[in-house]
Image: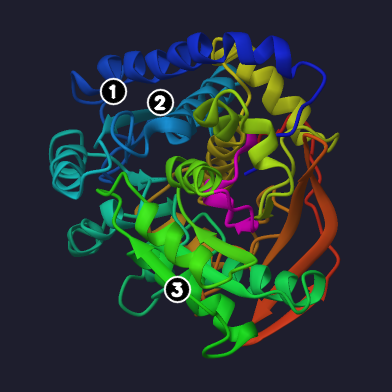
């Protein structure tokens, strides 16, 4: 996820906290409006026996951290999706049905995730769970959703857990997986930072484990001079960052959410240490990091390298212009961060799948649409879904912050099996109004 404006940064920084509050409040308002009652049928009987589908609505739901340690940056993902769905609904919906999106806060706590997902399935009778956010949180509900036959669509996490077609035939990721991202960062370190001592700092779950595995595909076992992990309950990284400094690390691969990317950078600065930081897409949103770092943040972020599976939120690619307008019209003109762009992109993908599922969508038909291999999304590369491999993106681009601008370098890497290859990006163009079928 990327955002890299420069011209209006000073003005926007002054308003960022206030406008972020507005964005989160908008999500919370939508939550109250949607979750206080069962989905509306508009007075009509269901169009079929499919849960969540009536003559005029399709109801889906999500769990996401509107509060808690992952809220900074991620609370606006669901706000972006809500805004895109509102845009679709104002343009006639999908096959004549409006998309009703129920957003519930789990505070990035798996116990809360289990509670709210059960509410969505058993009380709200959703058609599907869409874009559930977080590796530790969503891992706690995949068996429940699988046992109940609920489509578990486009998880907002890069864990390889989501790619198990035989065991979880209804479970699909949205993000490029962390092995893909880790291998790309390992290859970048090899190609562009040759001879420098590479190390690793990551979250102690699939985010850290998969990223490390990807990096070691390139660097080899033992190719990381020092490996440090932390739990998200730990707000002090002095020991981990101190160990990396003592080991002589010159390049640090980061597998962290934004709050811990910011904490890593500030801890290193306090220890008078400045390696080259290279991070996955989940922790790389520049505007979010600037907000977290505060004064002096721009200097700490200079040179930050990151991966990206979506197109830029600010370069001229069609999608950024459309989504920025949707953000203005339907999201109270909140800061247009990479997280907002990500939420709109995932919502576009759901709408693309719903369109392909046909005039009378069923849970089976939407899964068939995704595994058909015909969905393309709006990423740096077309989607990679197929019947025996649920990987969303096999390739990612590389962005670097230089002189305050976060831009793709033109470098991209693709992972096939254990082989990493440098490739040219294949960005998916915007078609029409950015609504499938229109």
In the image, residue 186 sits, relative to residue 321, either above or below, namely below
Q: Which residue is mark 1?
A: 41
Residue with the most extreme bottom position? 221
Residue 121 percent coordinates (x, y): 19, 43
Task: Please provide the residue range marked out in magenta.
Answer: 272-286
Looking at the rendered image, the disc whose residue lies closer to the viewer, 3 or 1, is 3
Q: Residues within 10 Å of mark 3 (few under 14, many from 20)?
A: some
Secondary structure category for the residue under label 3: strand
Q: In the rendered structure, which disc, 2 or 1, sits on the residue that comes first in sequence?
A: 1
Q: Quadrant of residue 382?
A: bottom right
Q: Are marks 3 and 1 in contact (CB under 8 Å)?
A: no
Q: Is residue 146 left or right of residue 306?
A: left
Q: Looking at the image, is mark 3 or mark 1 earlier in the sequence?
A: 1
Kindly report the distance in space between the C-alpha atoms of the residues bearing marks 3 and 1: 53 Å
**Picture coordinates of residue 399, whole percent (x, y):** 75, 51
Q: Nearer the viewer, residue 194 or 393?
A: 194
Residue 438, quarter of picture? top right
The residue at which mark 3 appears reads as 227
Residue underneath mark 2:
56
Relative image position of residue 164 (x, y in whole percent): 39, 75
Q: Residue at x 39, y 20 (%)?
A: 27
Image check: 79 left or right of 355? left
Screen quadrant of the N terminus = top right
């Amino acid at each position: 996820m990327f955002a890299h404006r420069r011209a209006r940064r000073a003005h926007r920084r002054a308003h960022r906290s206030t406008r972020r509050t507005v964005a989160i409040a908008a999500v919370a308002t939508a939550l109250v409006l949607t979750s206080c009652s069962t989905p509306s049928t508009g007075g009509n009987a269901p169009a079929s026996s499919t849960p969540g589908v009536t003559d005029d609505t399709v109801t889906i739901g999500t769990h996401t951290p509107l509060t808690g340690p992952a809220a900074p940056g991620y609370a606006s993902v669901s706000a972006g999706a809500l805004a895109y769905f509102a845009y679709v609904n104002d343009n006639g919906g999908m096959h004549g049905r409006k998309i009703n999106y129920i957003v519930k806060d789990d505070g990035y706590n798996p116990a809360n995730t289990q509670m709210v997902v059960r509410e969505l399935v058993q009380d709200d009778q959703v058609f599907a769970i869409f874009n559930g956010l977080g590796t530790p949180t969503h891992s706690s509900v995949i068996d429940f959703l699988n046992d109940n036959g609920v489509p578990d669509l486009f998880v907002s996490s890069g864990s390889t857990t989501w790619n198990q077609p035989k065991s979880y035939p209804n479970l699909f990721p949205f993000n490029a997986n962390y092995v893909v991202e880790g291998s790309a960062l390992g290859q970048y370190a090899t190609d562009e930072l040759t001879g420098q001592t590479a190390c690793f700092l990551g979250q102690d779950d699939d985010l850290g484990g998969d990223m490390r595995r990807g990096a070691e595909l390139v660097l080899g076992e033992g190719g990381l001079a020092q490996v440090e992990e932390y739990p998200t309950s730990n707000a002090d990284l002095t020991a981990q960052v101190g160990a990396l400094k003592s080991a002589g690390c010159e390049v640090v691969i980061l597998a962290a959410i934004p709050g811990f990317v910011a904490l890593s950078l500030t801890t290193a600065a306090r220890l008078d240490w400045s390696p080259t930081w290279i991070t996955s897409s989940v922790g790389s949103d520049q505007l979010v990091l600037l907000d977290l770092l505060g004064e002096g943040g721009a200097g700490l972020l200079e040179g930050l390298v990151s991966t990206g599976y979506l197109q830029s939120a600010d370069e001229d690619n069609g999608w950024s212009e459309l989504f920025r307008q949707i953000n203005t019209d339907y999201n109270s003109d909140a800061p247009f961060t990479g997280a907002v762009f990500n939420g709109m992109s995932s919502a576009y993908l759901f709408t693309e799948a719903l369109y392909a599922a046909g005039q009378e969508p069923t849970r089976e038909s939407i899964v068939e649409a995704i595994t058909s291999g015909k969905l393309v999304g709006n990423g740096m590369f077309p989607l990679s879904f197929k019947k025996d491999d649920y990987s969303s993106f096999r390739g990612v681009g590389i962005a670097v912050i230089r002189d305050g601008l976060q831009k793709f370098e033109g470098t991209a890497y693709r992972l096939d099996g254990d082989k990493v290859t440098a490739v040219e990006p294949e960005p998916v163009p915007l078609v029409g109004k950015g609504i499938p079928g229109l």
